[in-house]
Amino acid sequence: MWIVYALVVHVLLLGSIFVIYFRSPVINDLKPQSQFIGYGLEAPANRLVLIVTDGLRAASFFEDNCRHVPHLRKIFMREGLVGISRTRVPTESRPGHIALIAGLYEDPSAVLKGWKENPIDFDTVLNRSGHSYSWGAPDILNIFQKLTGENDPRMYFDAYSHDMDFSGKHKTYKLDEWVFRQVRFLLNRKKEELRKHQPVVFFMHLLGLDTAGHVHKPETALFLENLNFTEHGIWQIYIEFESVFPDKKTVYLLTSDHGMTDSGSHGSGAPHETETPFMLWGAGVSRTATTVGNRKFVANDEGVQLPLHELEQAQLTPLMSALIGLPPPMNNFGILPTGYMAVSEEYEAMAAHSNALQLLAQYEKLLEQHRKGLFADILNNFDELSQAEIDAYKQLIVKLHTKRDYAKSLARSNVVMELTLKGIDYYHGYYRNCLLLSTTATFLGWIFYLYRLLSRNSAGKLQIMLERQENVSRVALDVSMFLLLFFLVAQRAPIAIAFFLLLPIPVWMMALKPKACGTSSAAVPISQPGASARLTSASQLFLIIVCAELMVFTFFERRLISVCFVAFGCYNNWRNFVPNSREFYTWLALVVTLGCFPLLPPSVGYQNWYLFLAGIVLILVNALWSTERRLMFSNHTKYCNALVLLNTIVCVHLHSNQIGVPIVLHLASWSFLIYAFASIAFNSESKLELRLAQICFNLGSLYALLCTSYESVFVQLLTMELSLSLSAQSSRSSEKSVLRLAFTILLYTFFSLFGSGNIASISSFDPNIARCFLSNFLPFIIMGLVLLKLLLPVVLSLAIVYTHCECAREQEQRIFICLLIICDIMGLNFLFLVRNQGSWLDIGSSISHFVIMEVTTLVLLLLSYAAKLLLRLVNCDRLVEKLR
């Protein structure tokens, strides 16, 4: 029954991180602010032309005195503002465009959609405008198209096909050329109609530079060729717009969604990735912003210096909106930059006030939800911005505008906007600390339950105390449940939050029941001999915690697991060998050699032909090094394994020389995949050592089919070291420790992943893993082979443990309970290390660390069953009966 409890509790704990960290900041049921024309103010521009050069970093724009953008330089030498827009991580296309057009940074809940889309709809500049026209890549345009109503005639989207997207050709600027051609076609076809529309937004997404950066890398000749073509194309489009709309009521913004590193990557927070150029010119744009800092840049070869303006990417959203007389999008989090518009003081003050009202609308929605609770007055509140202060601000702005004191109005709006953003963050994360505390209590209650399972059938002070205080603890927990439930209902807490705040109480009810684990103070008398030896002591629990904490650090520094492995190996096995014996020096050499593997580059994406061949040779030597071992195997086992290893060498050689692998060789690999397990299952041998030898031979050969470098060498040496260690332990009469066995299993499991570099395959995989099985890129089949590669060393390790250690076969349940305790202590650490901001890689890694620890024991339980099936140790009926 404890396995069912473990499954339920761990599923709930997995769900807790999404409630704690990954709730959406998007607020629904908001109303847009009034357009500026409603205040009797005319916008400086009737139309906005937004040009996003995907992947263009600021360094490429300003390099060599702006030498690579000569046509754009003609514009900003004459008019407008130029500067750097700072993006936030993750520096990816979808969040970057949403930050520009909606003023909304990455939604943490997008992780639930695999970062492919935002799960909750939001407002944009395109939605606020009277009409909008968009061209570009389908992946970007679809983000905004799905936010519109069905067949909305006000919004026009024109995307090229996916076949054209990422051609990998030299002429990547063809993507931008298509956009320029479609824009000209629309301008010429609907010239008269477009002149009547206002406000109108023209959005051009230019993907060519991003593609060129990925394929050719920035600063290469082919990338600069694309940059020269694109900037000249933008110049020509600017001339075309000025010709079609001669009223001087057009404003232009050129910027980028994110930058790019020298290696052609983006997503993290390096300056090359977060610093993008922006260039703003046209109607209503100031020549120099009043808030400009001291930074300047050299604009041409004559040494002319211009101010380098700096702002946050989301600030461009309210700025674009204000220039065409629109209020900011309802979900915008950007603050209007001061001094960027060449407008009257009244207009700029009203634009800032509209921005403040839009932010306050979101804050007031959160405040309203909080104030609905019965205990809102006695709970913590954001005291810097109360409802009374909001009302006072609104009245103050009316008075200041009546007095025409626009400077004070602008200053006060800026202060209120800063406070509002702080208040939104405060209420959005209002329950986070409480949820972390309750989830920690759930972890501790579950760990305490497992600790009591380890002490089952043993009497002790704790058991006697629980029996004596049973009524007190039950009443205390019942009262706590009632009071907390009443509080949450009265406070109108969201259901998901209320559930996880209540979760610790039933877990602790289960843990504190005197007979919950089948124990009783009468079960084993304290004076009975051996009772204290079987009891899991507090010192052992402390040792478990130390081991768990040590393993946590290995997730952040792969090389640290070498220290863990060598230190634990020496501590656990040094005294088990006869000093100065051949076995001792062999074991010591294996430990030192294996400790060096985590210092090598990860095997994923790293290929080495000589190390690969060494692995194959080691498989044969390990299996057939003596006459006795050769006689263990049947002829078909020896021949099939030898042939498949030869097949592996041929496949890898052909693939490395870019020669097509014949389908016959692929079929041979798939056939051996079936044979490797079937021949073990149908083997009638009952002696464990002989069955283990065939398991190691078959699965070692199968593992070699999936290797690209030194992984096979590592796994063969690891199995040799583990066999030697356990054989030496079994030859001595020392008492076997369940805790040591549990930590051994966990250490060798993680060491097989970190030592071979295969841990990287969890988030990204090298298609070369499947080169002996597939000719084409089939991601789902490749992912299945990756999982097989990850699990084979673990099955091998478990089979060796069950073969050489009788204690592992007798104390299986206690071993896995120890494993659960260690993994849950590690999971509790990772609970506080989960990130909801940063690059997708950082966020994904922090989630995967927590998920790995929550599922490790359950996966090991399944793999242990697989290992025992291969060893013919147990059938299904016996396993179920034993686990009960």
Image: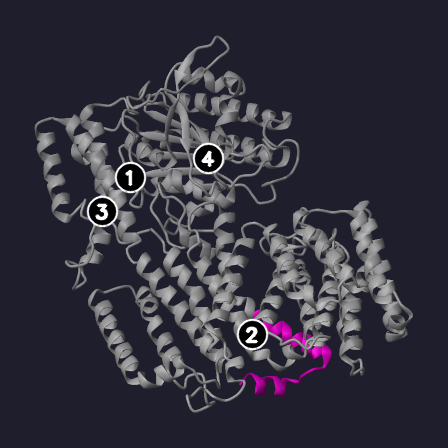
Residue occupying the far top of the picture: 302
Q: Cα distance, mark 2 to mark 4?
A: 46 Å
As for residue 871 lying within the magenta part, the answer is yes
**Circle 2/circle 3 CB separation < 8 Å:** no
Q: Amino acid at mark 4?
A: Thr
* Residue bearing mark 2: 816
- Sort mark 1 into few (<14), some (14-19) or many (20+) by Cα contacts within 10 Å: many
Q: Cα distance, mark 1 to mark 2?
A: 56 Å
Q: Earlier in the sequence, mark 1 or mark 3?
A: 1
Q: Amino acid at mark 3?
A: Ala
Measuring from the top left, give residue 329's x and y in whole percent.
30, 42
Pair 2/3: label in front: 2
Judging depth in this view, the residue of 864 and 183 nearest the camera is 864
Q: Earlier in the sequence, mark 1 or mark 2?
A: 1
* Residue bearing mark 3: 361
Q: Which residues are magenta?
A: 858-884
* Residue bearing mark 1: 328
Tell me, yes or no, if residue 115 can be seen here. no
